[in-house]
Image: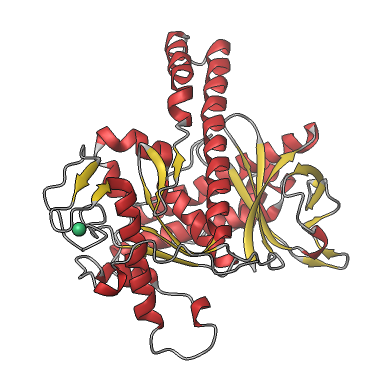
Amino acid sequence: MNKGLEIRLYPSKEQRVLIDKTLGCSRFVYNQVLALKKELWEDYKISFNPNLKSFKEEWPFLTKVPSQALANSYMDCMTAYNNWFNSIKKKTKQETKFPKFHKKGQKNSFRIAATKTSKGYDIRIEDYEHIKVPKLGLIRFRNYNYIDWSKVHIYNITIKKTLSNKYFASICCELVEPEYIKPKFDACGFDLGLKDFAIFDSGEIIKNPKYYRNTEYRIKKTQRQLSKCKKFSKNYKKVQLKLAKLHEKIKNQRKDFQHKTSRQIVNENQVIVSEDLNVKGMLKNHKLAKSIQDASFGSFCNMINYKANDQRRQYVRIGTFYPSSKLCHCCGFKYKGLKLEERFWTCPECGTYLDRDENAAINILNEGLRILNRNTVGSTGNDKSLKPVDTVYNSALEQEPVITSSYTACHAGKSPIFSG
Ligand SMILES: [Zn+2]
């Protein structure tokens, strides 16, 4: 199983200098290649591929850093240029803009692929505290202590530096499959909200932590402080660093919360159903934008998706246009005039008193089970419940569904299936 892991690096002073140099040189190579190609295209309309070797002869300082990082940077520039070139030659339908030059602080990362040497691969975990990287040597790191590193094969490493001057590495590697955890429940459906982070069909609620709101006053204060400083003065840089750290803190808190929540949902349920949120479309509504960004549902759904894959769960996403809050989950009546501020309503058809969010979650669950059922009916094999479902394709078809009577019983999947 291939996976990307992020670890925090604690390079020594010499290593820091070399990493910083490599970051600079990678950016330099990218920009030089791009500048050359741009000039030759604009002046002579030719696509010229410069030679990286000649770069090293012209600028000897490039030989002091890991050559692979430069080669990858060179390739990245080529890919970006070719994407643009194919787009103007109408070879692809996608429209691509001419690649931008990399500015300092904007793209602070470089990538090195592992190669096999006589002593094994040149990027490897040496012990639980050190990772070996060509030219950089052993770098101290921390994270993922529960992984049996002896069985991990690393394909490549991306080293990056944050605005708060911290070093991280993403390692792409092959891991042994994680231990399978038996789910407690058949299925769960949930609705993502702004007031509460998630509302389940069982009525259970996960509160929105709203880290941003809580730290907002500190950020605003620091921003004001920054605006009063003389630009690029010593103090300016100090306050700028403080601001970067605050933003980073929120990001980490949010990530931590999302990882824990998604892990719990995946471990407890075999089938998970949620709405396929069109986050980009929602962000256009500025009033809601901050809260949505705060909760960042998109990354949360991605976490559920990959964790569900690891644990052989089924994750179904319902199309955005499915009117989950407008349907009565008991009789299927559609209340067209439901307003956003109506938190509760009574179904005129069957008289059920409905909690808006809980009703939506039940509808989402039922709809997900319906899609899943339709996809597994007629297939053979004993473990058909474990087969993946192409949910994205199906949810696109589920814009105005007809509710069938078989699913009008709510909490359809809430009985524990594994009694043990
Ligand atoms: Zn009803």
From the viewer's side, name the closer residue of 105 and 53: 105
* 158 horizontally vs 185: left or right: right
Query: Which of 89/160 is in front?
Result: 160
Q: Give the quarter of the figure containing the C terminus.
A: bottom right
| Apparent side of residue 14 relative to residue 319 in the rendered image (left or right) | right
At a point 75% along the width and 43% down the height, the residue shown is: 142
Q: Measuring 31% from the left and 68% from the top, which residue is drawn there? A: 395
Q: How is the image coloured?
A: secondary structure
Ligand 1 shown in quarter: bottom left
Check the image and name the residue furthest to the front.
351
Compared across the picture, whether 383 is left or right of 116 comes to: left
Q: How many marks?
A: 0
The percent coordinates of residue 233 (x first, y second) are 54, 12
- At 63% from the left edge and 30% from the top edge, which residue is drawn? 165
Q: Is residue 331 visible?
A: yes
Q: Position of residue 15 (x, y in %)?
A: 77, 38
In this view of the protein, can residue 278 be seen by the observer?
no
Residue found 59% across the figure and 65% down from its top: 310
Relative image position of residue 162 (x, y in whole percent): 59, 35
Considering only vertical position in the picture, is 38 above or below 244?
A: below
Residue 289, horizontal then vertical, whole percent: 31, 37
* Looking at the image, residue 36 lies above or below residue 370: above
Identify the image quadrant of the N terminus.
Answer: bottom right
| Residue closest to the eye, 399 or 230 | 399
Determine the image quadrant of residue 288: top left
Note whether 210 is above or below 46 in the view shown. above
